Amino acid sequence: MKCIIIDDEPLAIDVLKEYCQKMDFIELEETFTNPLEAISVIKEKKIDLIFCDIEMPQINGIDFINSLDNTPLFIFTTAYSQYAVEGFNLNAIDYLVKPIPYHRFIKAISRAKEVLAYRKSPVSLNDNVFPSHGESKSANPGYIFVKAEYESIKINLDDIEYIQGLKDYLKIHVRDTNKAILTLMSFKEILDKLPSHQFVRAHKSFVVNIGCIKTIQRNRIVINDMRIPIGESYKSTFLNNLGL
C-alpha cells in the first residue's frame, strides 16, 4: 500500500513515519510539510493512502482533499476533534486525534487495507448481494446475505448495530464481533433489503439499527462506544422515526 504523509509539524511526521515502518504492507513514498507539493506525487505514483493533517498554513487539509481528482483513501490526523463530522462527510477511512496512540493507528490502517483490497478485487456490483430467493422486504426473514470477499455471509438483522459508508463500500458493524463486514454495495441497495421500522439513515455515511441506540446526545448517536453524527438533512426524519 503506497502512502504519503502530509503534516506541517515535522514531529508529527516522525511519529507516523515510525508507525508506518513497523507495518510490512505499507510503502511510505514521501512526506510533505506543504500539501501543495504532494499533488504531483499523488498523481504520478498512484498513491493508495494519504495521512493528512487538517490545520495547515498553506491550505486546510479538508479543502485539500476536496480539491483532488480521483482521491486516494485518506486518514485525517489532527489535534482538533471538532473536525470529525466533516471527516465523516468526506468518507475518511478514519480520524486520528493527536497524540496518536499506536493501537489507533493500527486500527485505522487495517481499515484502509480492507477497503483497498476490495477495490482491487475483481468483484462486480451485480454480484454483491446474495439472491434473496424471491422474498420481499415486507416479508423480511430476519437476515440478509451480503458478499464479502469471495463468499456470501448471512447476517441476522438484530445483530447489525450500524452500517458505515466508505465510498463504494459499506462497512457493516455486527455486535459481539471484533471485525466488521466490508461489502461492495450502495446504501440504496442495502436499505432496500432492510426493514424501515428497524434501520434508519441518520447521516450521509451512516445507517443505524434503532434497537442498538444507547443514547442520543444533541447531534450524535451513541452505539456502544461509537459516536455517530446526525446529519442536518436526515435529522427530522430520523427523530420522527424514533417518535421524538
Image: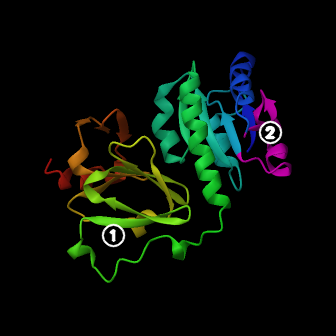
Residue visible at 80% across and 51% down in the picture: 46
Query: Which is more N-terminal, label 2 or label 1?
Result: 2
Is residue 40 part of the magenta span, yes or no?
yes
Q: Give the range drawn in magenta.
A: 25-48
Image coords of residue 232 (percent x, y): 35, 48
Quarter location, residue 192: bottom left
Residue 184 is left or right of residue 187, and the answer is: right
Residue visible at 73% across and 32% down in the picture: 5
Where 34 falls versus 112 (above or below)?
above
Residue 193: which numbered mark, if any?
A: 1
Dot 2 falls on a residue whose secondary structure is helix
Which of discs 1 and 2 lies nearer the camera? The answer is 1
Q: How far apart are marks 1 and 2 (CA)?
A: 42 Å
Comparing 230 with 214, the one in front is: 214
Residue 38: which numbered mark, if any?
A: 2
Image coords of residue 42 (percent x, y): 79, 46
How busy is the neighbourhood of tag 1: few (under 14 within 10 Å), some, or many (20 plus)?
A: some
Q: Which residue lies furthest to the left in this view?
A: 243
Q: Which residue lies furthest to the bottom in this view?
A: 134
Question: Is residue 62 at all visible to an observer of this figure?
Answer: no
Is residue 104 part of the magenta span, yes or no?
no
Residue visible at 33% across and 69% down in the picture: 193
Image coords of residue 77 (percent x, y): 60, 29
Question: Is residue 199 at all visible to an observer of this figure?
Answer: yes
Q: Residue furthest top?
A: 11
Dot 1 falls on a residue whose secondary structure is loop
Quarter placement of the N terminus: top right
How busy is the neighbourhood of tag 2: few (under 14 within 10 Å), some, or many (20 plus)?
A: some
Q: What residue type is labelled 1?
A: Lys
Comparing 91 with 100, the one in front is: 100
Q: Which amino acid does label 2 sit on?
A: Ala
Residue visible at 61% across and 58% down in the picture: 118
